[in-house]
Amino acid sequence: MSNTIFPGSTLGIIGINRNGVAMIAAAKKAGFNVGVYVDRSQPDITKMADFTIDGAYNDKQKLTEFGEACDAIIYQTPNIDSTVIRFLGQYAAIPQGINGLEIVQDRLMERAFLDQININIAPYVTVIGLDDVYQSIDSIGYPALLKPIQRGIGEQSMMIKRQSDITRAADFIDTGTYLLESWIDHTAEYTLTAACANGEVEIFPLAQLEYNEDRQLISVASPAEVADDMLQEMHRIIKSVADSLQYTGVFSVNFYVTSTGTLYVKNIELGLTSIANVYDNTTNVDQYEQQLRASVGMPLHVIRQLQTALLMIIRNYQSVAIRRQWLLKNNWKFRFFNSDTDTADPAGILGFVWVTGDTDLDALRNQVDDTEVWNKTLPNSGSDNEEQEK
């Protein structure tokens, strides 16, 4: 099926999350009808769509109804089983393709892919039980991460810091194959986001991530500054991934950097991310428009940096403290999610703030620190899958 569709056609979206509102808005602004498939009702996200179909991801009747109503279908996140996307491909174009999705959903396939294109990753082995963990830990070293091979909603990883922790893994390891991977002791984490289509690759400015000790994302800073040779290597890596993955659309590569300056690739993420929301106010085009352009057959927009910004994550427990900043800050831009879904979870994401007004990231960080809004942290509830170790 052709991947070129024109305004007036219907674009379907599946695998939607809080960023879905912006994706729907981008498609509507460009003149497309929008249909959304959800496995549970999310009216706060889908209300802008022309139609919504609620159904399980294994409900072939509902999926057929959705596929027949759409000219093309995109997955907003990679959390939809590739067999579902393949089924929908009988009825509508799948611009992003399926090959890349199958690779990133399987950690072993992803690491084999990265090995094949000569990209530096953490040492790993596959294990199927506690005996394998005991036998492999010496070669991997402590600390190590134990992860299911298959990525998916709600899956978790387990940190093994010492031999006594392996016993606890008995409750963690179920049936199937797991990945035992060295934990890379790092001093910084970065994300490089790009859009690719028809041989074109457009790369967004580098972003630096800050997490708290509970692995909750606190902030995204862009453009991040690193040595020129490191940035060139990051660009080489993301272009190599784009050339080999057989994927069309927006994707990200996440990096660790150690104290000695060694660069490791953490993982590949397909689709739209909260991290890339930093570009909503820092570049001339955002991830949503680039995803749309790639999906409907338009040329990608050339990306230009417009300003420096910190994207701060607002959580429910910060709702009172952030109200004062809402009234005071003339250089902050706010986006709140009008949703009742996560309000019971103090650590649930309430919205985003873009802190701008200075070209120096340290000056912006000092501005944030002075408010003391982000000084208090809460334990990670595990509800926000996007932030878990991948």
Image (cartoon, rainbow, N blue to C red):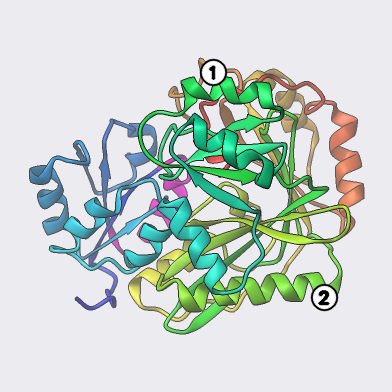
Viewed as shown, does residue 174 lie left or right of 63? right
Q: Position of residue 245 (x, y in %)?
A: 45, 71
Residue 335 in sight: no
Looking at the image, residue 389 lies above or below residue 114: above
| Label 2 – label 1 distance at C-alpha | 42 Å
Q: Is residue 108 magenta?
A: no
Q: Are marks 2 and 1 in contact (CB under 8 Å)?
A: no
Mark 2: amino acid = Asp
Q: Quadrant where the N terminus lies?
A: bottom left
The disc at residue 345 is 1
Instruction: Tell me which numbered mark, 2 or 1, is placed earlier along the sequence.
Output: 2
Figure quadrant of residue 201: bottom right
Local secondary structure at mark 2: helix
Q: What residue sits 43% from the left and 44% below the top?
A: 151
Q: What residue sits 30% from the left and 47% below the top?
A: 49
The disc at residue 229 is 2
Q: What residue sits 52% from the left and 70% below the top?
A: 195
Mark 1 surroundings: few (<14), some (14-19) or many (≥20) residues within 10 A: some
Q: Nearer the viewer, residue 368 or 132?
A: 132
Question: How many callouts does the rendering have?
Answer: 2
Looking at the image, residue 2 lies above or below residue 87: below
Local secondary structure at mark 1: loop
Q: Position of residue 258 (x, y in %)?
A: 82, 53
Mark 1: amino acid = Asp
Looking at the image, residue 337 lies above or below residue 82: above
Q: Quadrant where the C terminus lies?
A: top right
Q: Position of residue 351 (x, y in %)?
A: 59, 35
